[in-house]
Image (cartoon, rainbow, N blue to C red):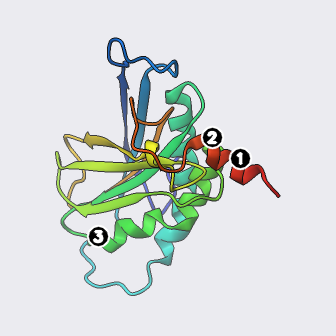
Amino acid sequence: MSSSPVLTVRKQWYCIEQIEPPEGRDDGKGPLRKVAACAVVTNPFAGRGFVEDLSLVLDASAELGALLGSECLRLLGGSVESYGKAGMVGSDGEQEHVNACLTSAFGNAFRESIGGADAWISSTTKLGGPGTSIDVPLAYKDEIWVRSHYDTVTLTIPDAPLAGEMVVIAAVANRGRLNARLGGLSREEADRNRAQP
């Protein structure tokens, strides 16, 4: 992963989780595989007090969105059905700094790299230090209202974020939850609705 002059990457970190269907309950869709790709980057606003204009980070985040999305796709090893994004900021920054890394510039590049429709990407951010846990929300990549795909990827990076850093996270899954059965709009219905003129 290359670094931009604004968001210098210190470390990349990946999480892969694969859950097999419970015995006797295989729905024929195979195991649930969830992947997260993280970039630990410098926070150019750390220690500077209140900074009104965060556009420097907004503009630079598109490169991270494309790169993390490509890594997610590579590590998943198949088609993406769900996605989400998240971020953590170290103690010398503020939550708004990492939120600036996850706006439309990041989201559009991430979506384009994994092949999603123009659907809302679930996200969350928090302030934390090394070893802080975060739940990255997932939802169906083409329609936020597909209930079967609401899920999370939980991760912790032992040495990040340091005080002057941010962790920018992209996450994907290859299917909805195992044994999802709470009704609502199905993935198939959402796909048919999108295909209609």
- Of the pair 115 and 159, the residue shown nearer to us: 115
The earlier-in-sequence mark between 3 and 1 is 3
The count of marks equals 3
For the residue labelled by badge 2, is the local secondary structure a helix, a strand or a loop? helix
Q: How much space separates mark 2 and mark 3, taking CA atoms?
A: 37 Å
Residue 41 located left or right of residue 60: left
Residue 61: where, in percent of width, then height? 51, 61
Amino acid residing under circle 2: Glu
The amino acid type of the residue labelled 3 equals Gln
Seen in the picture, residue 166 relative to 39 is either above or below; the reply is below
Q: In this figure, which residue is indicated by the disc labeled 1?
A: 192
Q: Name the residue under label 2.
A: 188
Instruction: Nearest to the eye among marks 3 and 1: give it.
Output: 1
Residue 148 shows which numbered tag?
Answer: none
Residue to which mark 3 is pinned: 95
Q: In this view, does 66 lie above or below 107?
A: above
Cα distance, mark 2 to mark 1? 6 Å
Q: Dot 3 surroundings within 10 Å: few (below 14), some, or many (20 or more)?
A: some
| Amino acid at pointer 1 | Arg
